[in-house]
């Protein structure tokens, strides 16, 4: 029987994760061009770990490995592979299937998603508000009053949308923009987090397993943006009583958060991870020490758990 002195026990009175009551998505908060914020409290003026950094040797090595990966830009290939006509009670439209793969090596996690003309149109309008000059030479497929469901028109638009996405991706500020990344990931993430809120953990995981690899590729310049989705995977696995899978998802999230102790997910994630580590018989003491250090550096009156944070994501 677990003792209340240990984090695996319901009666444990040790440190509880605390963080600020942030309710907005990390992706939205990152700004238009989504620059990757530098590690807080651990980097010097030149961008490297400072002499006062509390990172261990292993953490420093992992940090520099991540930095080197960031220097090599992930290149993606877009293909509008197929299209289908969908009819509903009051509407009829064409759904275009987009396949996204990473070039240069075998990609076992190719992304497959569907978008309709109105989705592309919304993307174009939102991009014009911020990047009008950058995309002024990119042609957007025009809307027609008639013939939208003909085989010829659908084939023409498939090629046009494929070229459109490829040209947008070629522009650095556009491919890193919130608008572009949200177009490719937000519908699926909203559905996944909705399932999480509804207790449909298996369904949420099915979606997250497909969308997170794409999100990681699109945000390689700023890995911290994937943290909410990875934490959602941890919560789902944990509540499905799969502690090993939950711990693995948490490790990925912690790697993304390295040297960002002030991040709102940092303390709740450490708290969840040390409880999982204790349940799995892993080393939880080092995680507990990091949590205590974090709370000493940045105490907060709020005591949100990891699950309480994740269910607040992608509400709108």
Image (cartoon, helix red, strand yellow):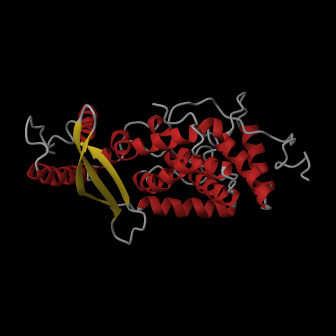
Q: Nearer the viewer, residue 35 or 303?
A: 303
Is 62 situated above or below 188?
below
Q: Where is residue 283 in the image (x, y as percent from the top left)?
A: 78, 60
Residue 52 in sight: no
Q: Nearer the viewer, residue 148 or 113?
A: 148
Q: Is residue 300 left or right of residue 87?
A: right
Q: Position of residue 176 (x, y in %)?
A: 36, 46
- Counting the numbered discs, the total is 0
- Residue at 34 percent across and 43 percent down: it is 183
Query: Which of the 4 image quarters holds residue 117?
Result: top left
Q: In this view, does 195 lie to the left or right of 34?
A: right
Which quadrant: the C terminus?
Answer: top left
Q: Nearer the viewer, residue 173 or 309?
A: 309
Query: Which of the 4 image quarters holds residue 10?
Result: top right
- Residue at 50 percent across and 59 percent down: it is 67
Q: Where is residue 121 in the image (x, y as percent from the top left)?
A: 23, 37
Residue sticking out furthest to the bottom: 106
Q: Position of residue 68 (x, y in %)?
A: 48, 63
Residue 136 in sight: yes
- Residue at 53 percent across and 36 percent down: it is 313
């Amino acid at each position: 029987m677990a003792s209340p002195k240990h984090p695996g026990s319901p009666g444990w009175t040790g440190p509880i994760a605390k963080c600020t009551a942030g309710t907005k998505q990390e992706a939205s908060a990152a700004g238009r061009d989504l620059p990757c914020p530098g590690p807080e409290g651990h980097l010097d003026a030149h961008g490297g770990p400072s002499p006062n950094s509390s990172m261990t040797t292993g953490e420093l090595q992992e940090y520099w490995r991540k930095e080197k990966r960031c220097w090599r830009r992930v290149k993606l290939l877009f293909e509008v592979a197929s299209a289908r006509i969908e009819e509903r009670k009051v509407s009829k439209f064409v759904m275009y299937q987009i396949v996204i793969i990473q070039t240069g090596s075998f990609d076992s996690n190719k992304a497959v998603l569907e978008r309709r003309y109105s989705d592309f149109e919304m993307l174009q309008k939102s991009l014009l508000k911020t990047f009008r000059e950058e995309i002024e030479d990119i042609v957007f497929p025009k809307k027609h009053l008639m013939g939208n469901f003909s085989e010829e028109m659908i084939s023409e638009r498939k090629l046009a949308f494929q070229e459109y996405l490829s040209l947008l991706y070629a522009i650095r500020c556009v491919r890193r923009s919130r608008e572009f990344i949200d177009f490719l990931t937000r519908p699926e993430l909203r559905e996944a987090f909705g399932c999480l809120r509804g207790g449909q953990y298996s369904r949420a995981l099915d979606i997250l397993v497909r969308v997170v690899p794409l999100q990681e590729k699109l945000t390689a310049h700023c890995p911290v943006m994937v943290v909410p989705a990875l934490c959602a995977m941890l919560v789902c696995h944990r509540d499905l009583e799969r502690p090993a899978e939950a711990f693995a998802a948490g490790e990925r999230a912690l790697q993304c958060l390295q040297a960002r102790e002030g991040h709102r997910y940092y303390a709740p994630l450490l708290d969840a991870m040390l409880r999982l580590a204790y349940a799995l018989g892993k080393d939880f003491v080092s995680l507990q020490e990091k949590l205590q250090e974090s709370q000493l550096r940045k105490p907060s009156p709020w005591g949100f758990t990891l699950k309480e944070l994740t269910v607040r994501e992608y509400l709108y």
